[in-house]
């Protein structure tokens, strides 16, 4: 269960199937580009995974020295720590980051790509999270498209 594919442009050196990235927005050099609507059509702060690279198409770019390629991306599932009471496969939740005391858990408690208030479906319950913060479960969620 994944959100729909989006066709966009990415630097040719970065255009590899399976690569994941967080979209950080457009650079100032992009303002003058005739392709900017095709290139900056993703949501800032979201995680994306490249599912397909169209090798036959390559465009010049002000930023990427080898140009850009046309790719298809999706928002992949994200691993996140949530309250164990909510951790049931198939449940729909509204994401609220939990407060982590352990620095090594920070990326699971407040994962990049999810924002507070996002509606998500729990795809898998992976495991209990050990450590000082009891009552958390590691789950894999898919953000629902708005």
Image (cartoon, rainbow, N blue to C red):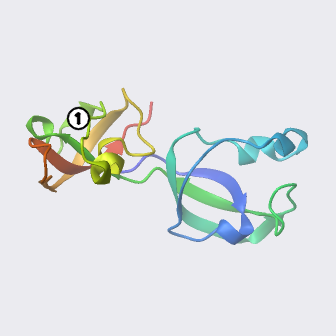
Relative vertical location of residue 57 with respect to residue 107 in this rendering, above or below:
below
User: What residue did someone put label 1 on?
Assistant: 92
Q: Position of residue 49 (x, y in %)?
A: 50, 58
Quarter where residue 93 is shown: top left
Residue at coordinates 73% horizontally, 42% vertically from top-left? 26
Q: Position of residue 20 (x, y in %)?
A: 51, 60
Which sits in the foreground, 61 or 73? 61
- In the drawing, does residue 60 fall left or right of residue 144? right
* Residue 71, percent from left and from top: 64, 61
Looking at the picture, does residue 95 appear above or below residue 124? Answer: above
Q: What x and y, as percent, mark residue 48?
A: 51, 53
Residue 129 makes an appearance in the image: yes
Quarter of the picture containing the C terminus is: top left
Name the quadrant containing residue 30. top right
Extreme residue in the top direction: 117
Residue that appears at 31% across and 49% down = 103
Which residue is painted at 12% across and 54% down in the image?
Answer: 130
Whether residue 141 is visible here, answered yes or no, is no
Q: Is residue 134 left or right of residue 29?
A: left
Given residues 120 and 4, the one toward you in this image is: 120
Say which residue appears at 22% left-offset and 50% top-offset.
Answer: 139
> Under tag 1, what secondary structure?
strand
Q: Is residue 52 left or right of residue 129?
A: right
Give the number of marks.
1
């Amino acid at each position: 269960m994944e959100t729909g594919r989006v066709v966009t442009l990415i630097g040719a050196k970065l255009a590899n199937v399976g690569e994941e990235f967080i979209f950080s927005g457009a650079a100032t050099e992009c303002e003058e580009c005739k392709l900017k609507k095709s290139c900056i059509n993703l949501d800032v702060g979201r995680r994306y995974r490249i599912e397909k690279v169209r090798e036959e198409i390559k465009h010049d770019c002000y930023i990427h020295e080898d140009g850009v390629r046309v790719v298809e991306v999706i928002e992949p599932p994200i691993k996140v720590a949530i309250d164990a009471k909510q951790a049931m496969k198939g449940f729909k939740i509204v994401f609220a980051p939990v407060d982590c005391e352990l620095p090594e858990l920070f990326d699971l408690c407040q994962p990049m790509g999810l924002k507070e208030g996002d509606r998500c479906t729990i795809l898998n319950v992976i495991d209990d999270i050990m450590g000082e913060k009891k009552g958390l479960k590691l789950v894999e969620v898919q953000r629902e498209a708005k």
